[in-house]
Image: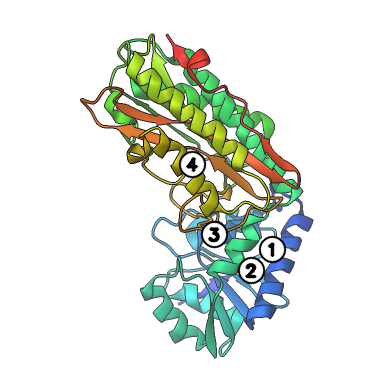
Amino acid sequence: MTARPDMYRFHNGEKAPLQFATSEYEARIAGLRKIMEQTGATAAVFTSMHNISYYSGFTYCAFGRPYGLVVTATEAVTISAGIDAGQPWRRSFCDNITYTDWQRDNFWRAIRSVTGEGAVVGYESDHLTLLQKTKLEAFLSPARLVDLYAPTMVQRMGKSEAELEMIRAGAAVADVGGFAIREAIKEGAREIDVAMAGRDAMELEIAKRFPDAEYRDSWVWFQSGINTDGAHNPVTARRLQRGDILSLNTFPMISGYYTALERTLFLGEVDPESLKIWEANVAAHEYGISLLQPGASCADITHKINAFFEERDLLQYRTFGYGHSFGVLSHYYGREAGLELREDIDTVLEPGMVISMEPMLTLAEGQPGAGGYREHDILIIHSDGNENITKYPYGPAFNVVG
């Protein structure tokens, strides 16, 4: 009977052109190795989609299987399931090991083949489950564990020039989707029809700008009427009615990098009470953008916008924080939680950070001006201020449509 291997290297075909140059990934790994040196980790074992994508270029599709990236002083190796064959190797800037499912836990045996036993192992407390942590300890017998969640997040928060170029392109793609959605809005159209117009336009634009990329995961949330009350409400088949409040949300995904455009619109006409709320939220949006300066803390910015709303008796309608970081993240993985505009985040803005400004007010059904109002721009922090890379207009002058 043929012996079945626990793992093997299936380097099938040629390496694909990745979104960034090899030197970009080498610089990221070098930064990680500095973190490892500072923390005493001799092997980093990453399991999250965001860190694996950030350090290797490979964005996995788990489908119930574990994936990994192991970094030591001399090696960087992605660990992938056999179902994906050679694609993980082609899309990793580094080496790759494929583990088989002939027996349970070959994933951890593959990791052990790189780390050995007794290493000081760095892991991610925000991602590694209790079950997998138990297996890590059983298979790797670490001398001790080091949590790399926070320092790697801090590393990702500062963008390279190559990342900033990518994020600018993503914001432009989001705008393309926004304009396509605006053209598709008409009385009687379904939310899903309008959303598809925006998604298709973005995917075509991504393929034009990035002919060597993999295409997946771009999406649109287009909401109308009561469906605008939550920022993440799914698309439905509700038909648009004249006077509806609308919420446009485009989310292009390019090689693991997320960008967004979010706008309030009205179909055909906007009543006076709704206009009053909308204009107040636009004013808060503009004020918030002016506050995104190097040296300002997330908490201080948040308190100032809170005061702005409180003066207008609107703070009680605020639904969440006022903005967040951008980079390798998505609605189902990853988040640079240390860079959010919230009262409990003291991070100070620095040049090279990317952050949104997105105030949202929600008034319940039955109240004058009922609905969810949200404007969203993406800004790059520079040493002398900020750069707004979102170009789709906001406010009533452009967004009463149909």
Q: Are marks 3 and 4 in contact (CB under 8 Å)?
A: no
Q: Residue furthest front?
A: 311
Q: Secondary structure at mark 4?
A: helix
Q: Secondary structure at mark 2?
A: strand
Q: Secondary structure at mark 1?
A: loop
Q: Identify the mark nearer the N-term, 3 or 1.
A: 1
Tag 3: amino acid: Asp
The CA span between labels 1 and 2 is: 6 Å
Q: Residue furthest right?
A: 23
Q: Is residue 94 above or below residue 237?
A: below
Q: Position of residue 171 (x, y in %)?
A: 61, 34
- Quarter of the image with the N terminus in it: bottom left
The CA span between labels 3 and 4 is: 15 Å
Tag 4: amino acid: Ile
The CA span between labels 2 and 4 is: 45 Å
Tag 1: amino acid: Cys
Q: Identify the mark nearer the N-term, 1 or 4.
A: 1
Residue 365, by quadrant, is: top left
The CA span between labels 2 and 3 is: 35 Å
Residue on which disc 1 sits? 94
Q: Is residue 41 above or below residue 319?
A: below
Asked if residue 360 can be seen in this view, the reply is: yes
Residue on which disc 2 sits? 77
In front of the other: label 2 or label 3? 3
Q: Nearer the viewer, residue 286 or 9?
A: 286
Q: Position of residue 95 (x, y in %)?
A: 67, 66
Residue on which disc 4 sits? 305
Q: Which mark is residue 346?
A: 3
Residue 241, by quadrant, is: top left
Q: Nearer the viewer, residue 282 or 53?
A: 282
Q: Position of residue 260 (x, y in %)?
A: 53, 36
Residue occupying the point 51% across, 44% down? 304
